[in-house]
Image: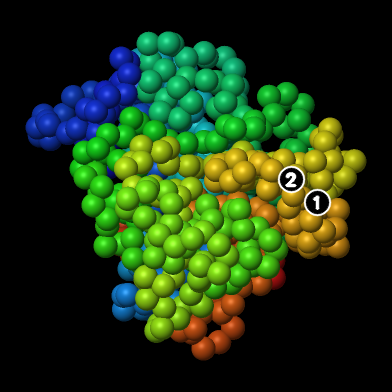
């Protein structure tokens, strides 16, 4: 089944002459499958990676305390009562299918004389494996992606997988340096259009994320500092100012060919408002925190004021964009907060008619906050040339830039004297970095927001109104499909309780 998925997927892209409207068209006989070239498969695999992130990001946005649901729907008990099973939240199967696609590129790049595709494929594999660890803990890694050679792959220890991802990314960087993109095939790279420099910066930024995620684990300091210094010594740096990792295959106003976030939470290809637009709402905690810190410039970009977007003036709220018109919902509340009187995802991600924004996988802001954390935690033992404050302030400015908020407001905020906003005025520097990193994920990367919350227990977001107790979701169950195909290895992982069984980097 995975091989059929791979070959059929190859028809979803047309590369070599540019990304056009037929990028996502399918019109072929699935019973007569051709050989797919790595360039075809890479482009589709990257597009599929973006689509695959939509659902876990949604879950993370909720459990990370940034989104809740309006009361125009029956309350979701899986999300807000934490009553889910191994039949819910299956992000496993489509991610491993996606990983097989990247493995196909790696295995066939040399034969097709497309070695420049191996590096990007390895970076994307590392991104996908990291997602799986953060959702499920121990996973098949060293024994995975071998097809019929390993039909029941063993599971690897999650910390060892994290270490393996650093090695995988080192290999990706070596491949990228050795193989410049052929210009005729640069369009198969639907992120950076063949820029190996940016792929290396992405790889370094992902390495830094993986390292900082485990920074609170006892006994990891020597390993982490050594690896951070290797990033510095490599010389390419992390994602530069204005450079985010955004997937764009050439979205067109046709069914199934528009930005998936826009399609799910905003509008159709004909600009008709989706019913789902009435569902996600900013939490009362998040919106009130932005107000209390004077961060209204970002507030007006992350959310719309009550009444939502003005259809006659796309990107502008119906109500005046003043703080009092931004209303959040208590997390998990099941009554009293209808869609029309609460704040929906805003113009940074949803503007009627703007269906072709890139789908963001990683931001330059995150990379800067990870540099700030590394410098603050490890000081002179890491050879970073900037200060924790300089990286922190660059991260805030990059967050403003991505959201489309005025740069002058970022400058004002950074000298405001407010805790967790003004670095110099913040008594707990790591807490300030953690809060701003959590904030920069809003609407873009909910899984990372939830992961940072689990790692730091900060910010202290309210418990769900639909749950009695203090427990929070810490991970997911292994899906029932994996029990069916690899049951002995799943069972060997022991009893899993998503409200008690922690990912290795979640120490308290």
> Does the CB distance between marks 1 and 2 fall below 8 Å?
yes
Judged from this view, the residue extending furthest toward the bottom is 468
The answer to whether residue 134 shows anywhere in this view is no
Q: Secondary structure at mark 1?
A: loop
The answer to whether residue 390 shows anywhere in this view is yes
Q: Is residue 16 left or right of residue 475?
A: left
Nearest the eye: 405 or 75: 405
- Tell me the residue that label 2 is attached to: 411
Task: Report which quarter residue 16 is drawn in.
Answer: top left
Instruction: Please name the residue shown 38% across and 56% down the image.
Output: 309
- Location of the C terminus (image quadrant): bottom right
* Label 2 environment density (alpha carbons within 10 Å; few <14, some 14–19, many ≥20): some
Instruction: Please name the residue shown 42% across and 48% down the image.
Output: 315
Q: Height in image: 113 above or below 68?
A: above
Q: Position of residue 285 (x, y in %)?
A: 59, 72
Q: Secondary structure at mark 2?
A: helix
Colour convention of the picture: rainbow
- Tell me the residue that label 1 is attached to: 415
Q: Is residue 388 left or right of residue 321?
A: right
All told, the count of numbered labels is: 2
Q: Height in image: 499 above or below 117?
A: below
Q: Height in image: 365 above or below 418?
A: above
Q: Is residue 20 left or right of residue 164?
A: left
Task: Report which quarter residue 265 is drawn in.
Answer: bottom left
Instruction: Please name the residue shown 18% across and 24% down the image.
Output: 34
Instruction: Please name the residue shown 63% across and 63% down the image.
Output: 290
Disc 1 to disc 2, C-alpha distance = 7 Å
Q: Position of residue 395 (x, y in %)?
A: 69, 44
* Label 1 environment density (alpha carbons within 10 Å; few <14, some 14–19, many ≥20): few
- Location of the N terminus (image quadrant): top left
Q: Position of residue 212 (x, y in %)?
A: 70, 49
């Amino acid at each position: 089944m995975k091989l059929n998925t791979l070959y059929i997927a190859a028809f979803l892209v047309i590369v070599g002459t540019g990304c056009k409207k037929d990028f996502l068209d399918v019109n072929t006989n699935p019973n007569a499958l051709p050989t797919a070239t790595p360039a075809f498969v890479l482009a589709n695999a990257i597009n599929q990676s973006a689509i695959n992130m939509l659902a876990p990001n949604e879950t993370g946005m909720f459990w990370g305390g940034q989104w809740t649901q309006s009361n125009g729907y029956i309350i979701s008990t899986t999300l807000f009562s934490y009553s889910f099973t191994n039949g819910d939240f299956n992000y496993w199967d489509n991610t491993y299918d996606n990983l097989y696609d990247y493995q196909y590129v790696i295995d066939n790049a040399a034969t097709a004389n497309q070695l420049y595709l191996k590096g990007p494929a390895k970076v994307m594999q590392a991104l996908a494996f990291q997602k799986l660890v953060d959702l499920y803990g121990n996973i098949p890694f060293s024994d995975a992606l071998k097809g019929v050679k390993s039909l029941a792959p063993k599971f690897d220890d999650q910390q060892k997988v994290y270490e393996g991802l650093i090695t995988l990314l080192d290999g990706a960087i070596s491949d990228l340096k050795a193989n410049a993109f052929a210009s005729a095939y640069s369009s198969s790279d639907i992120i950076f259009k063949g820029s190996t420099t940016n792929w290396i910066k992405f790889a370094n930024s992902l390495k830094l994320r993986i390292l900082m995620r485990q920074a609170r684990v006892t006994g990891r300091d020597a390993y982490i500092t050594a690896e951070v210094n290797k990033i510095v010594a490599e010389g390419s740096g992390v994602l530069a100012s204005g450079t985010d990792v955004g997937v764009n295959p050439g979205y067109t106003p046709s069914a199934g060919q528009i930005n998936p976030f826009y399609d799910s939470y905003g509008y159709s290809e004909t600009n008709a408002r989706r019913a789902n637009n009435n569902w996600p709402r900013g939490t009362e905690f998040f919106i009130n925190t932005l107000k209390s810190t004077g961060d209204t410039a970002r507030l007006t970009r992350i959310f719309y004021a009550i009444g939502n977007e003005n259809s006659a003036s796309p990107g502008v709220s119906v109500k005046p964009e003043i703080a009092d018109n931004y209303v959040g919902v208590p997390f998990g509340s099941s009554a009293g907060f209808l869609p029309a009187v609460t704040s929906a995802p805003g113009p940074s991600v949803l503007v009627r008619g703007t269906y072709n924004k890139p789908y963001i996988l990683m931001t330059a802001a995150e990379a800067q906050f990870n540099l700030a954390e590394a410098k603050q935690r490890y000081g002179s033992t890491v050879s970073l040339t900037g200060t924790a404050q300089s990286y922190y302030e660059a991260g805030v400015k990059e967050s403003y830039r991505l959201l489309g908020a005025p740069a002058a407001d970022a400058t004002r905020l950074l000298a405001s004297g407010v805790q967790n906003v003004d670095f110099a005025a913040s008594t707990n520097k790591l807490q300030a970095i953690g809060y701003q990193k959590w904030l920069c994920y809003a609407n873009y990367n909910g899984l990372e927001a939830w992961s940072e919350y689990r790692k730091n227990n900060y910010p202290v977001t309210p418990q769900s109104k639909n749950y009695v107790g203090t427990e929070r979701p810490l991970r997911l169950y292994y899906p029932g499909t994996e029990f069916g195909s690899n049951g002995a290895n799943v069972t060997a992982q022991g009893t899993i309780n998503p409200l008690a069984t922690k990912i290795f980097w979640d120490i308290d």
